[in-house]
Image (cartoon, rainbow, N blue to C red):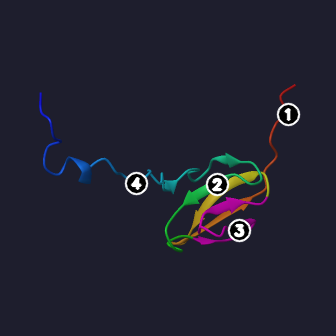
Amino acid sequence: MAHKKGQGSTRNGRDSNAQYRGVKAFDGQIVKPGQIIVRQCGTCIHPGRNVKLARDFSVFSLIQGRVQFESRRRVSVYPVAVPSPN
């Protein structure tokens, strides 16, 4: 048995938490109010209609509706009649 720790072993053992960024709701999907559409660093994708930008640059929906990615860097949510579960 070693009586001392190996060289450099005390410098290891740290790692950062995963950020899980990316598109969470794709084009044509139905989202609820407050549901995150995109998690991102900075404004790669800008908010369009019925969508807001959070403090951490997440794009989230304000209404229930269908996601639509417009032009190259804009995402909107348009209201759509969703059938009730009856």
**Would you name the residue on which mark 1 appears?**
84
The x, y position of residue 73, in whole percent, is 52, 72
Q: How far apart are the alpha carbons under marks 2 and 3?
A: 10 Å
- Label 2 element class: strand
Q: How far apart are the alpha carbons under marks 3 and 1?
A: 26 Å
In reply to whether residue 17 is colored magenta, the answer given is: no
Task: Classify residue 39 as left or right of residue 16.
Answer: right
Looking at the rendered structure, the kind of residue marked 1 is: Ser
Q: Residues within 10 Å of mark 1 (few under 14, many from 20)?
A: few
Name the N-terminal-most of marks 2 and 3.
Answer: 2
Name the N-terminal-most of marks 4 and 3.
Answer: 4
Figure quadrant of the N terminus:
top left
Name the N-terminal-most of marks 2 and 1.
Answer: 2
Q: Residues within 10 Å of mark 3 (few under 14, many from 20)?
A: some
How many marks the image carries: the answer is 4
Q: How far apart are the alpha carbons under marks 2 and 4?
A: 23 Å
**Would you name the residue on which mark 3 appears?**
52
User: Which sits in the foreground, 46 or 17?
Assistant: 17
**Would you name the residue on which mark 4 appears?**
16
Give the magenta-colored segment's residue range: 46-62
Q: Residue at x 67, y 71 (%)?
A: 48
Residue 62 is drawn in which quadrant? bottom right
Looking at the rendered structure, the kind of residue marked 3 is: Lys
Q: Residues within 10 Å of mark 4 (few under 14, many from 20)?
A: few
Residue 45 is drawn in which quadrant? bottom right
